[in-house]
Amino acid sequence: MQVVKYVFQPHGDDRGQLVALEEFRDIPFRIKRVYYMYDTVAGVVRGHHAHKSLEQILVCIHGSCKVRLDNGREKKIVPLEKPYEGLYIPNNIWREMYDFSPDAVLMVLASELYEEADYIRDYDEYLKYIQSEEQLMNVEEKV
């Protein structure tokens, strides 16, 4: 599994820092939804789901956290610690966010509006879904 992190261009001077994000320039998709998490209680794990079509970029704009990515065959842990770095999560990837610092603010840029039908919230169901997607791709490659 390839982990893709975007390093955004910070602009700063003696007044401070600024990072601007533009769809299709800094972000590889049209941004249809933005949300953020903060005041996450110690020990809490967020996420526990995958998306069928939605793509995301996660930016820990303050503090730090970790993201566990799982494609059904391989798992990777990615730290998010810099406000100018974004983790790209394509569709069909299980994600769990955890180990939030007390001051963490995790911003999420999403390619789609909220749609409950796009979520896979059960891990065993996720594994079955991934397997069926891979089988479908293999059939399409043979045609």
Image: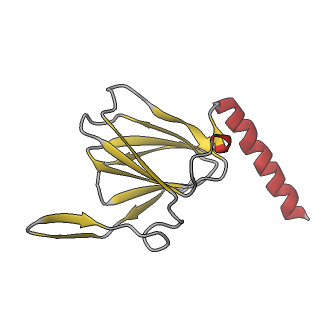
Residue drawn where x is 72% and y is 44% of the image: 130
Q: Position of residue 128 (x, y in %)?
A: 75, 37
Name the quadrant containing residue 99: top left
Report the number of discs. Answer: 0
Residue 124 falls in image quadrant:
top right
Q: Residue furthest right?
A: 143
Residue 116: percent from the left, percent from the top? 63, 40
Residue furthest toward the bottom? Answer: 25
| Whole-percent x, y for residue 86 in the image | 40, 57
- Is residue 13 left or right of 44 when viewed as pictured? left
The quadrant of the image that shows the C terminus is bottom right
Q: Is residue 50 above or below residue 113?
A: above
* Image coloring type: secondary structure
**Residue placed most toward the observer, 59 or 132:** 59
Q: Is residue 1 left or right of residue 134?
A: left
Give the answer, above or below, for where 85 lies relative to 43: below
What residue is at 51 percent from the left and 67 percent from the top? 28
Rendered position, 90 above or below 63: below
Seen in the image, is 115 located left or right of residue 2?
right
**Residue at point 30% right, 33% down?**
39
Query: Residue 16: image x %, image y %?
Result: 14, 63
Foreground of the two, 114 or 19: 114
For residue 29, side relative to residue 104 (left or right): right
Residue drawn where x is 34% and y is 66% of the image: 8
